Amino acid sequence: MEFDKLRGDYKEAMESIDLSKDSRERILSNIRLEDLSVPAEKQATRKRIPLFVILPVAGAAFAALAVFGFMLGLAAHSAGTKNQAELALKTHNQHIEQISGDKIDSYIENDKDGPADETQTYKVDQNFISSGTKGIIGGDKSMPASAAGESILGTLSFLPFAEYTETVETDDRYGIDVRRYNETGGSEDTVTVIVSGGINDIGGSAEEIKVDGKDAILYGSKDKDEYNKAIFITDDNMFFVIESGKAYGKAVWENIVKGAAVEAS
Amino acid sequence: MNTLARTFDLPYIFLKMMAMFSSVSDVSREESSSGKIDYSTFDREQMNERAEYLLNNYGNAILRLAFSYVHNKEDAEEIVQDSILQILRARPSFENGKHELSYLMTITSNISKNRIKYNTRHQTVELNEEIATKDTTDKSDDHSFILEACEKLPVKYKEVIHLFYCEDYSTAEISKILGMKETTVRSNLSRGRDKLKTILKEEYGYGI
């Protein structure tokens, strides 16, 4: 009620604002001069798409694009991994072909870039260990190292594996590649050989030597150039592992291998 | 007897019926002319006629609405012209004249707000025009200070005050014209009124 006065006064004030005759005619003449036709294409495009429609659609499209890109990346990565695996398998198979003769040294030399966590089973007859040979499958013969031709404190263990699996894997503890031989004939013995050098769980690196024309690999030591294990292959393709409680240098191991070879033959 | 004869006089009945149909037809034509308005059917001549009609019937209303925003008569007249041009170009159709006026008010409101933005960006022009307006304002009007007081209100308050007090629209109608909720219109009206009351009282000694 109190604003009725204001309403009246406001209206009265506004009444002073009106269109004069001149203004009216000027506006009308301006309107008559204007082109009021609406082009057809303008009529067609006049309807604008509101932002609340554009934004969610654009957002969804962007998200879909991002997901598509991610999936594409994933697929590419997967394909790359698959290719790598195939290549590694191929390389590995080539290595297998190479060692199918009797060259154990080619294991180490060629398998530096071998595939990780890949297992291959070898059969006695198909590989380099002849069946029926002394010390085969489960045969475990121990003797003092001195008996092998060198005066050492330790035990020589002859672990001829007739049937075993070879696994090339990465030792996560030290970040090195190792080749692991698991005896599958029942004794559950395992021999680990470094294939890419570096430090294994004992320390040191592997070294290939020739003893009386036979291939041998020295490995497993705490100090540089010292080893406490050796693998050697006899003339009749017997595969032996010698373990020592103490680490020795290359010269000592040559004598041990010689002695072991005599003992094993 | 004469009446009875007339009752069965077929030519008489026919003429009566024709007269009845004729009157119905006239009424429907009249409803049509005062009812639906479709700009899309207008040719150029009809457009000019409609512009004249709008200017004569609603010209002052839209001029005052525009003035309530811009407080400058020259700007307000330009807004009137632009509003009429816009409705002619849009070629809308309306159920009745009231709907047409509401539409025109909405257009005027939007154009006026755009003009305020433009004037804000072009401060120099606005100042000159403001000076010119103040010079041309009818000082003889005793209540012109109310318009000056309204000028000091924010746009959201003065638009609802003008439509409510000057054009006598209901809050529901204002909400449709300005495209806002009715509750917002009411609250803006209430706050604007209080603010105007304070300005009028403190600066002009006007008591409500």
Image (cartoon, rainbow, N blue to C red):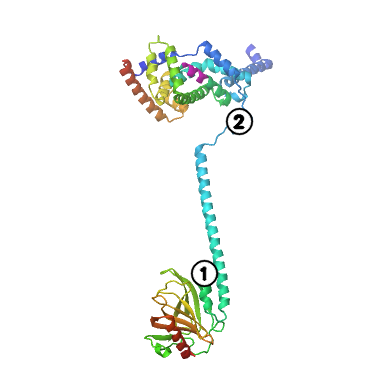
- The tag on residue A59 is none
The residue located at (67%, 17%) in the rendering is B14
Query: Which image quarter is the N terminus of chain B in?
Result: top right
Q: CA distance from mark 1 to mark 2?
A: 69 Å
Q: Quadrant of residue B130?
A: top left
Residue matched to label 2? A42
Q: Residue at x 58, y 76 (%)?
A: A97
Please tell me whether residue B127 is drawn above or below residue A261 in the rendered image.
Answer: above
Residue placed furthest toward the front? A251
Dividing the picture into quarters, in which one does residue A158 lie?
bottom left
Callout 2 amino acid: Lys
Say left or right for A88 vs B10. Answer: left
Task: Give the chain letter at badge 1.
Answer: A
A153 to B36, vertically: above or below = below
- Quarter that holds the C terminus of chain B: top left
What residue is disc 1 on?
A113
Q: In which quarter of the view is residue A34 placed?
A: top right
Residue at the outermost top position: B140
Chief SS of the magenta region: helix
Q: Nearer the viewer, residue A1 or B177?
A: B177
Residue A185 locus on image (x, y percent): 48, 83
What percent of the width, then of the height, locates residue A253?
44, 83
Check disc 1: other Cα within 10 Å, few if <14, some if 14-19, many if 20+.
Answer: some
Which of B70/A262 is in front? A262
Element under label 2? helix
Query: Which residue is more in the foreground, A196 or B199?
Result: A196
The magenta-colored residue range is B73-80
- Say if labels 1 and 2 share a chain: yes
